[in-house]
Image (tube, rainbow, N blue to C red):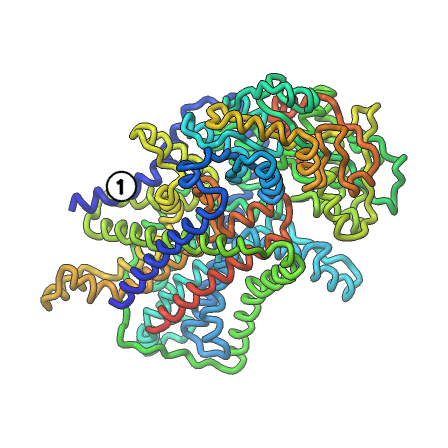
């Protein structure tokens, strides 16, 4: 029992390192910076950040939830295609989608030109806040989609049939049975979306929208005060910790049923108009979130291909994929360890270990990277060894950042394996490793695959940690995007961006085949 | 169970790919293990100047001197924190960045040491280097006025301060104040005119804006091309890059020397405080300041050499004679935080 608790604490320590650096900064005086920030900067950015988070959370929940319901439960033309296609935006880095969409919809872009030739007037332009919210929702809805679809697919039709036999119509059945049952998956998905929104810098920078993150970078890069930046980060994380506690409280009130293993997928038969509507929704979502930005990228890529594509791309791809795979395996294992600790040694210590361990996802990447680097260097000095510049440290830093992603899908899965199931299995003489293999694994594997996929694509897109901790020669596709975009060469950056999409495609397809076998 | 194996296989693939990656990089000149064994240690550079702008220079340097160069690219501030954290065990001997403010900050943080190089002191003008030689500017990046040549003639323009005048109401476009280029522009204005006057100017700019501030210079030039504003402030190389692509109805304006000349920032470098290869680092900096280094350094990104006698790229030459401001760029760093606060107060987002 204590071993489990120690394991959870050890994992939380990963995140405690950068967090400690941030909290330690609270003691550093920062002169009149706070007075300046409170008067001229914070009021606007707090309002902007809150508004953006709420909008993105709602939009992602609606888009992801609707798409999940349609592809999991409703029979309409194209359902099988959209089931996996709607996951694809996951592979697009948010800052790239933002730039591609800005290219299409901006004044000088294709849509604006078309609008002008059709209507003779300039197309109205979205405000910075709306544009940021739209882009973030389009890149982040797949988190909700992936998780909630898993819930709908596995909860089976039977509950809905029961609801209908009790006289509920379809809508009421959806509202009163299917939705509440999918609540923990919604909560996990939306929590990931909100954390990612809070940490986002790339997208809001493209639209020049001021958020808490831009204030953090402003304090550091503009006012030359890393302590002030760390203090702001610590404040942000305090809010996140409260939100996470809230989410867990909300989730703890729900009860879950086990998967209806015998149920074969059966889909709701709907009228032709309804099927058409369902199809239209998916087509539109897929077009705006994936086809349009990718087409824009392809157009740019063709223009730039001759000067940009060299043999070095093989090493970029190799570095991206190896890091992605290694991190996916490592972080998922840590996530499992964390999940089982929570299960085997419940209690305040474990709960808080989990909360702290998963905070890193909401911390602006560069701040976390520097905090981690500083802490690891100090530890290395203390031990008398050089730790930095190794792949191991890189993986540990990825873990600090992405444990929320590695743990979230598993945590919900583990909650469904109730103690009763374990007892029943033991009663049948199945215990120990055999219990894990024969009872837990079949119920967990979708969650494991989901976690691994999310970590893989996130690491492929990740920049600040990769930049700061990579050993020589480990330039990834994302690093290449950084090299090109720092000097404003967005068109050329389309090529590494498309390579990330291509590399992210395979695991998406694999996961789809894997999870739809139910 | 098969899935277990699949996961295992995936991880094995991952690790073997990683191993392949190692094998592959040993053949390139940039690899520590092999280098330590027989050849002298390669010179390690931390750079926030983009790879495509420095890699050709390092290749030429290696060809000239036989010294191998290894580099890590990242944003400047994380690199400075990295140098601080690594302390005496840092592999880096040179810090290369694209902004004088950052170089000043690096010096303040104690991560640079004086180069003590008469060659550099002679080649790089006083205004573009640290007085003690902690850092040296290696190329000039001019931040200047561009205008719609269908609407305006060059003689209607005077300089940066004039853009705060009421006659430009609804005609001016600016980039976000979060970009360091604008922060050093305003810092240099504080140095020249004092804080109160500078704030007045910035407030005037904000009042004259035709559109919300832009996220980058390219979008700004496109807005002028599109006729949405008449005049704006950009780094000249962004304009040059667009000009290389297509004919633009936009021209460049240099503020005359009588009004203080054109605002410039530098790309520059310094030797790190704990440089393991100090001599090689100094040779690299001196090579950068030489004629060949200067020409390559500037022309790769359509910038200006710091050594005035070195010729500029033909595209840049076509913009006419530019007299850079000769006020010391130490001010850009010293006053940057004040500039940021000033812009926050003035509502320049």
Is disc 1 placed on a helix, strand or loop? helix
Q: Residue visible at 38% across and 71% down? A: A513
Q: Residue visible at 37% across and 61% down? A: A450
Comparing B314 with B106, the one in front is B314
Taking the image as drawn, is residue A36 in sight? no
Taking the image as drawn, is residue B48 in sight? yes
Rendered location of residue A26, percent (x, y): 42, 27
Residue wearing tag 1 = A10
Above or below, comparing residue A304 to residue B108 in the picture = below
Comparing B307 with A493, the one in front is B307
Rendered location of residue B142, percent (x, y): 73, 34
Above or below, comparing residue B125 to residue A515 in the picture = above
Residue A172 lies in what quarter of the image? Answer: bottom left
Residue A224 lies in what quarter of the image? Answer: top right
Comparing B307 with A510, the one in front is B307
Q: Residue visible at 61% across and 42% down? A: B56
Rendered location of residue A482, percent (x, y): 55, 46
Tell me the subunit letter for badge 1.
Answer: A
Total marks in image? 1
Rendered location of residue A201, percent (x, y): 53, 44
Quadrant for the C terminus of chain B, please: top right
Seen in the image, is A210 located left or right of residue A372?
A: right
Above or below, comparing residue A412 to residue A243 in the picture = below
Seen in the image, is B261 located left or right of residue A206?
A: right
Quadrant for the N terminus of chain B, please: bottom left
Residue A71 lies in what quarter of the image? Answer: bottom left
Seen in the image, is A84 located left or right of residue B256?
A: left
Q: How crowded is mark 1: few (under 14 residues within 10 Å), some or many (20 or more)?
A: some
Q: Residue visible at 64% across and 54% down? A: A307
């Amino acid at each position: 029992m204590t071993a489990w608790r120690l394991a959870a604490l050890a994992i939380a320590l990963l995140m405690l390192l950068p967090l400690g650096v941030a909290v330690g900064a609270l003691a550093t005086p920062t002169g009149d910076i706070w007075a300046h920030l409170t008067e001229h900067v914070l009021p606007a950015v707090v309002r902007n950040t809150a508004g953006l988070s709420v909008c993105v959370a709602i939009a992602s929940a609606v888009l992801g939830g609707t798409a999940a319901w349609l592809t999991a439960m409703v029979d309409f033309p194209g359902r099988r295609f959209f089931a996996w296609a709607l996951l694809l935006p996951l592979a697009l880095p948010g800052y790239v989608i933002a730039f591609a969409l800005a290219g299409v919809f901006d004044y000088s872009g294709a849509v604006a030109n078309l609008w002008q030739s059709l209507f003779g007037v300039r197309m109205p332009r979205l405000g910075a806040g709306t544009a940021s919210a739209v882009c973030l929702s389009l890149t982040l809805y797949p988190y909700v989609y992936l998780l909630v679809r898993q819930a709908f697919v596995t909860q089976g039709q039977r509950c809905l049939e029961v609801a209908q036999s009790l006289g509920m119509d379809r809508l009421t059945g959806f509202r009163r049975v299917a939705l509440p049952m999918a609540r923990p998956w919604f909560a996990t998905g939306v929590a990931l979306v909100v954390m990612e929104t809070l940490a986002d810098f790339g997208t809001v920078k493209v639209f020049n929208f001021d958020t808490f993150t831009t204030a953090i970078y402003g304090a550091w890069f503009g006012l030359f005060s890393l302590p002030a930046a760390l203090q702001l980060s610590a404040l942000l994380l305090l809010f996140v910790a409260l939100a996470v506690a809230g989410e867990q409280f909300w989730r703890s009130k729900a009860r879950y049923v086990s998967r209806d293993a015998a149920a074969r997928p059966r889909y709701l038969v709907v009228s032709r108009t309804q099927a058409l509507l369902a199809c239209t929704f998916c087509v539109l979502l897929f077009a705006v979130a994936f086809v349009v930005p990718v087409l824009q990228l392809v157009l740019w890529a063709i223009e730039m291909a001759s000067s940009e594509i060299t043999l070095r791309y093989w090493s970029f791809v190799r570095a991206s994929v190896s890091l992605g795979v290694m991190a996916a395996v490592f972080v998922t294992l840590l996530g499992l360890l964390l999940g089982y600790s929570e299960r085997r040694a419940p209690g305040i210590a474990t709960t808080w270990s989990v909360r702290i361990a998963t905070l890193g996802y909401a911390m602006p990447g560069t701040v976390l990277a520097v905090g981690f680097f500083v802490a690891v260097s100090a530890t290395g000095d203390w031990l008398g060894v050089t730790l930095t510049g190794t792949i191991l440290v890189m993986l540990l830093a990825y873990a600090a950042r992405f444990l929320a992603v590695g743990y979230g899908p598993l945590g919900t899965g583990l909650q469904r394996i109730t103690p009763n199931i374990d007892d029943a299995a033991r009663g049948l003489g199945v215990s120990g490793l055999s219990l894990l293999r024969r009872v837990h694994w079949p119920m967990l594997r979708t969650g494991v695959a989901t976690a691994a996929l999310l970590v893989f694509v996130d690491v492929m897109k990740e920049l600040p940690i990769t930049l700061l901790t990579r050993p020589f020669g480990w330039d990834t596709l994302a690093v290449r995007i950084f090299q090109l975009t720092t000097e404003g060469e967005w068109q050329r950056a389309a090529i590494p961006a498309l390579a990330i999409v291509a590399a992210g495609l395979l695991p998406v397809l694999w996961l789809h085949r894997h999870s739809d076998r139910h | 169970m098969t899935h277990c194996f699949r996961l295992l296989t995936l991880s094995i693939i991952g690790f073997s790919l990683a191993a392949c990656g190692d094998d592959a990089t040993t053949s390139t000149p940039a690899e520590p293990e092999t280098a330590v064994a027989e050849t002298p240690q390669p010179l390690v550079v931390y750079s926030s100047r983009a790879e495509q702008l420095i890699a050709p220079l390092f290749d030429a340097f290696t060809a000239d001197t036989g010294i191998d160069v290894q580099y890590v690219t990242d944003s400047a501030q994380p690199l400075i924190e990295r140098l601080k954290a690594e302390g005496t065990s840092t592999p880096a001997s040179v810090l290369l960045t694209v902004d004088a403010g950052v170089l000043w900050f690096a010096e303040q943080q104690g991560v640079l040491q004086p180069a003590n190089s008469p060659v550099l002191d002679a080649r790089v003008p006083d205004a573009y280097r640290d007085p003690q030689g902690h850092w040296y500017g290696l190329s000039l990046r001019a931040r200047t006025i561009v205008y719609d040549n269908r609407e305006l003639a060059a003689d209607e323009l005077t300089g940066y301060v004039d853009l705060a005048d009421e006659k430009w109401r609804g005609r001016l476009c600016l980039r976000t104040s979060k970009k360091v280029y604008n922060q050093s522009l305003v810092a240099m204005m504080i140095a020249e005119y004092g804080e109160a006057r500078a704030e007045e100017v910035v407030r005037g700019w904000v009042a004259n804006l035709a559109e919300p501030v832009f996220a980058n210079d390219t979008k700004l030039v496109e807005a002028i091309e599109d006729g949405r504003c008449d005049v704006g402030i950009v780094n000249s190389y962004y304009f040059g890059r667009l000009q290389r692509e297509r004919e633009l109805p936009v021209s460049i304006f240099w503020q005359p020397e009588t009004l203080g000349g054109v605002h410039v920032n530098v790309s520059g470098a310094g030797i790190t405080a704990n440089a393991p290869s100090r001599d090689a680092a100094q040779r690299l900096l001196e090579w950068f300041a030489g004629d060949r280094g200067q020409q390559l350094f500037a022309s790769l990104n359509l910038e200006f050499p710091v050594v005035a006698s070195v010729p500029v790229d033909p595209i840049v030459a076509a913009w006419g004679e530019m007299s850079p401001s000769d006020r010391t760029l130490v001010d850009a760093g010293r006053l940057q935080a004040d500039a940021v606060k000033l812009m926050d107060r003035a509502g320049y987002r």
